[in-house]
Image (cartoon, rainbow, N blue to C red):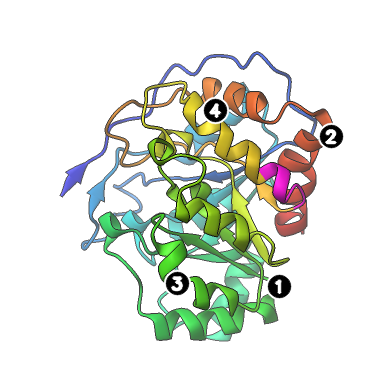
Amino acid sequence: MKTCLAPDANPVKPKHLLPEGSWDAHCHVFGPAAEFPFAADRSYTPPDAPFETLRTLHDHLGLSRGVIVQASCHGTDNRAMLDAIARSEGRYRGVAIVDGSETDQQLAEMDAGGVRGVRFNFVAHLGGAPDLEVFDSTVDRLADFGWHVVLHLDAQDILTYADRLTRIPVPFIIDHMGRVKAQEGIEQPSFEALQQLMENPLAWVKVCGAERVSVGRRPFHDAVPFAERLIQIAPERVLWGTDWPHPNITKDMPNDGELVDLMCDFCTDPQLRQKLLVDNPMKLYGR
């Protein structure tokens, strides 16, 4: 089992002032493990990354709101995420991981607790695709709650599951620009498929995870053309987040202040930045 590196404890102050009401639409809380143990079958162990540290980071970066995305190291035990939302006084919303056994009442309780979607991991290093029957049956239940589904895919999965993606009946979000690889260029088949997918009015994408797309080292400028293209294609359905505390980073730990400035580099138009950081996340998470 891999032990993850800690995030950069000294984020720089961003050079840019963000729009009022800006969201970090993809971040995590981990533990504290003494209170919220990690899943026994996890593929990695992160350092504790509690609510208090996340809140302090967001204050430093100028981010008003946040979406706490349940990560695989906690499995379907969503208590750490729900606890953080409850303590945030309305500042945070959440995306849960479920196993399909949840009752309508349990999902309704999650909704009351600030959950607005569920996440499925397909990536190989986290165990590969989920049970697709559970996936299909769960997705079919989300509309009743006004929820969406978040898909953490490897780049090839965009092609492998293309037909299934077109059948999703609720809004769905592709994490981290589909984890395409910058070294394979803007015309790689997976990125072309992602661009085609964004013609679907239910498809959203997060233009974050530059450190996962990049072949280089921080500040990961080789990821910029991919983010720019996705914003151009679907300006009303793009989101951005820090991905703090950056689990499973092995090559170069990002600095979260630099990530804010990188986002400002690939989204220079103030009107588009307003959509990316404020208007778009409000559509999915504002209630």
Which residues fall within the magenta stretch? Answer: 231-236
The amino acid on which the numbered mark 4 sits, given as a three-letter code, is Leu
Secondary structure under the numbered disc 4 in the rendered image: helix
Disc 2 versus disc 3: nearer the observer = 3
Q: Which mark is residue 271?
A: 2
Gap in angstroms between the C-alphas marked 1 and 2: 27 Å
The amino acid on which the numbered mark 1 sits, given as a three-letter code, is Gly
Q: Residues within 10 Å of mark 2 (few under 14, many from 20)?
A: few
Gap in angstroms between the C-alphas marked 3 and 1: 24 Å
| Picture quadrant of residue 146 | bottom right
Q: Which mark is residue 242?
A: none
Q: Residue at x 66, y 74 (%)?
A: 170
Gap in angstroms between the C-alphas marked 2 and 3: 34 Å
Q: Residue at x 36, y 47 (%)?
A: 31
Mark 4 / mark 3, whichever is N-terminal: 4
Disc 4 versus disc 3: nearer the observer = 3
Q: Which mark is residue 146?
A: 1
User: Where is residue 75 shown, x and y percent of the image?
Assistant: 35, 63
Disc 2 versus disc 4: nearer the observer = 2
In the picture, measured across the screen, residue 201 lies left or right of residue 192, that is right
Which residue lies under the disc numbered 4?
57
Q: Is residue 28 above or below residue 165?
A: above
Q: Which mark is residue 161?
A: 3
Secondary structure under the numbered disc 1 in the rendered image: loop
Q: Residue at x 39, y 23 (%)?
A: 8
